Amino acid sequence: MFRRTRDREFRDAQRAGQALLAMHTELPLPNTPATDAATAPAAPEAAEVPDFLPPEFRAPSRQDVSGLMMRWDLPLVIDGEVHACHCGAYRNWIVFNMRDDSVWLRCPAGHEAKEERLSTAWYNRNSGPVDHFHPNLEDGLRHLGH
Ligand SMILES: [Zn+2]
């Protein structure tokens, strides 16, 4: 599921995220909330430049990363039943939501399986805001404790 090309895409997205964070920390805090800035009409000088920010400075969207991942420490109940890996593990999962909308589960022993009963909609309902971008899968797994 995690081919080298996907790793590279993920790494690129990570770099973009880091560039954005670096930019945010270097810019003075705006006086208005970010939501106001986003809805405010573009300044005339900005309108003359089609791509105001180079791609590497744009916030990565879901389409820019290979996938999202989160910890799921509690037993995972799917269709009313506690889901267990073939090795017997039933908690401390890492849940992946891939760009193709598939959801994968990884047990603490490292077994990965696509879970057809879960979807991006389920993932969105159960995940918090994205707070980290990882250069590769291994880094993300380490961050999440696997
Ligand atoms: Zn397992």
Image (cartoon, rainbow, N blue to C red):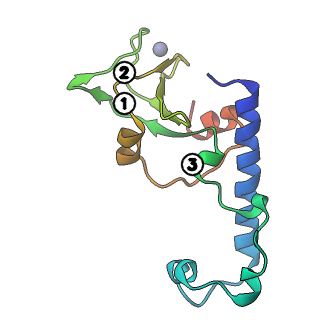
Residues at badges 2 and 1 in contact (C-beta under 8 Å)? no
Residue 145 at what x, y percent from top left?
56, 35
Which residue does the image show at 42% across and 35% down from the upper left? 72
Residue 119 at what x, y percent from top left?
39, 34
Q: Residues within 10 Å of mark 3 (few under 14, many from 20)?
A: some
Q: Residues within 10 Å of mark 1 (few under 14, many from 20)?
A: some
In the rendered structure, the answer to whether residue 82 lies left or right of residue 2 reads left
Q: CA distance from mark 2 to mark 3?
A: 28 Å
To which residue does mark 3 refer? 62
Q: CA distance from mark 2 to mark 1?
A: 16 Å
- In the rendered image, which quarter contains the N terminus? top right
In the rendered structure, the answer to whether residue 73 lies left or right of residue 137 reads left
Residue 130 at what x, y percent from top left?
53, 53
Residue farthest toward the left in the current orientation of the protein? 80
The quadrant where residue 89 appears: top left
To which residue does mark 2 refer? 90
User: In terms of sequence position, does the residue under pointer 2 or pointer 3 come before the other?
Assistant: 3
User: In terms of sequence position, does the residue under pointer 1 or pointer 3 come before the other?
Assistant: 3
Placement of 16 over or under 38, stated as above or below: above
Residues at badges 1 and 3 in contact (C-beta under 8 Å)? no
Disc 3 within 8 angstroms of ligand 1 (CB):
no
Q: Amino acid at mark 1?
A: Leu
Determine which of the numbered discs, if any, sits on residue 118 in the image: 1
Q: Amino acid at mark 3?
A: Arg
